[in-house]
């Protein structure tokens, strides 16, 4: 098989296309499938970007990022997590997606493996394959809050495994793991001679709990994060990866070649974003209200939420009481009552046809309307 044939489409995009068609026909569709903030980028960030645009050139920054953003992030890690991170170790990338392309290009030779959770963020598998690697998808369930564990890592490790990815808070489940859990995963990776890669893109979007950074327990962990979610800056395409010292140079070489540098304007906007407190707190509170509403409304309709999510903007619900085919259910719900949900199959194969993902990155009014429509669908 040619490499490109192993790259799977993001299946929910087909569903989204159908939703758009229905909208074009005049229907009001409730979008609970999309994992993108429904808020605009905070005004202070827009203003900083406009000021920067007026005063500065927009030429390339150094490949590893604008030094001012690297330094601002280093100070932010001290304030946010109490960890010292040398600014040189913080590499600025076009979104966290850019960070993963760099990492796998550096870490993997042909046929080497990366361990991922199933369910998990679908693009991960494809990033690994694009670098000529092989994903090892390990089934995770409610017993480990849908996260990999130290034991699972030891159990599934193979000779060619090079790294393990942990997404905390998780996409699609929104579940969060604590320092002890991360420490166990980190210890397993150290014992086996591999890297722990912690995707912390949903940090800051947690409710009643703070997600620890892997750097709090392991200063050699690779941490990936970005401005897309917490700061509502998906389209700015800026993220970062914190690597151990010995990986800076190989990453720099890859970055110079594959994208030269992350977008200059977005990097300067990012510096201002790190200063923002009020807007991001307002968004977080709104997400939490929606989460609480759904956590009480969905079980009444037969959606089982086995572990209450405490992060991101997702609820991963078991639909066994309603259907034995989550995918067909999602398509039918879209056609009959105009509610778009993501079927579990987008996130893996393990019990995927028994699950759907609700995204609450959509306004409360629409969410309430969505629940009413689902009730109507399920009662007639
Ligand atoms: C777990 C996870 N990691 C990474 C990304 C990619 O984000 P970015 O916009 O920073 O490329 C997403 C986007 O949905 C995600 O859910």
Image: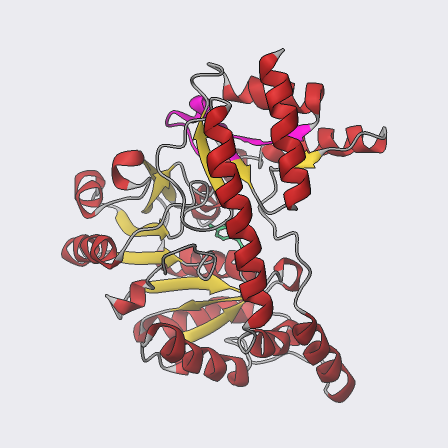
Residue 90 point in image, percent of width and height: 43, 74
**Which residue in the rendered view is the most extreme toward the top?**
380
Which residues, given as a range, are shown in magenta?
339-357
Between 290 and 18, the residue placed more toward the observer is 290
Between 278 and 42, the residue placed more toward the observer is 278
Quadrant of image for the C terminus: top right
Residue 108 point in image, percent of width and height: 36, 53
Q: For the point 79% across and 30% down, which residue is it? A: 21
Residue 235 point in image, percent of width and height: 66, 59
Which quarter of the figure has residue 47? bottom right
Q: Can the viewer see residue 336 in this picture?
A: yes
Apparent side of residue 139 relative to residue 263 in the rendered image (left or right): left
Apparent side of residue 71 relative to residue 118 in the rendered image (left or right): right
| Residue 346 within the magenta-colored segment of the rendering | yes
Q: For the point 60% across and 30% down, which residue is it? A: 371
| Residue 336 within the magenta-colored segment of the rendering | no
Q: For the point 57% across and 54% down, which residue is it? A: 286
Count of numbered circles in the view? 0
């Amino acid at each position: 098989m040619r490499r490109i044939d192993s790259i799977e489409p993001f299946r929910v995009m087909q569903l989204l296309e159908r939703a758009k068609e229905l909208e074009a026909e005049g229907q009001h569709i409730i979008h609970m499938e999309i994992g993108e903030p429904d808020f605009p980028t905070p005004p202070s960030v827009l203003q900083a970007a406009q000021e920067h645009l007026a005063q500065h050139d927009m030429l390339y920054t150094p490949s590893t990022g604008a030094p001012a953003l690297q330094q601002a992030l280093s100070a932010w890690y001290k304030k946010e997590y109490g960890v010292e991170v040398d600014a040189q170790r913080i590499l600025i990338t076009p979104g966290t997606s850019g960070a993963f392309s760099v990492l796998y290009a550096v870490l993997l030779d042909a046929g080497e493996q990366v361990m991922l959770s199933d369910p998990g963020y679908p693009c991960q598998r494809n990033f690994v394959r694009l670098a000529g690697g092989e994903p090892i998808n390990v089934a995770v369930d409610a017993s480990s809050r849908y996260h990999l564990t130290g034991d699972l890592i030891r159990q599934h490790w193979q000779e060619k495994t090079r790294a393990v990815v942990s997404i905390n808070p998780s996409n699609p489940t929104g579940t969060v793991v604590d320092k002890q859990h991360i420490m166990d995963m980190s210890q397993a990776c150290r014992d086996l001679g591999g890297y722990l890669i912690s995707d912390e893109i949903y940090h800051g979007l947690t409710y009643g709990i703070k997600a620890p950074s892997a750097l709090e327990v392991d200063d050699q962990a690779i941490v990936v994060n970005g401005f897309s979610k917490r700061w509502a800056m998906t389209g700015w395409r800026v993220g970062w990866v914190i690597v151990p010292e010995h990986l800076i140079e190989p990453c720099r070489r890859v970055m110079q070649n594959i994208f030269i540098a992350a977008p200059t304007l977005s990097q300067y906007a990012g510096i201002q974003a790190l200063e923002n407190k009020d807007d991001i707190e307002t968004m977080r509170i709104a997400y939490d209200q929606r989460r609480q509403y759904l956590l009480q409304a969905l079980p009444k309709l037969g959606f089982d939420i086995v572990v209450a999510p405490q992060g991101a903007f997702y609820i991963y619900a078991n639909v066994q009481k309603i259907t034995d085919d989550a995918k067909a259910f999602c398509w039918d719900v879209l056609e009959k009552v105009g509610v778009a949900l993501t079927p579990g199959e987008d996130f893996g194969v393990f019990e995927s046809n028994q699950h759907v993902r609700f995204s609450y990155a959509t306004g409360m009014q629409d969410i309430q309307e969505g629940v009413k429509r689902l009730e109507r669908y399920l009662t007639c």
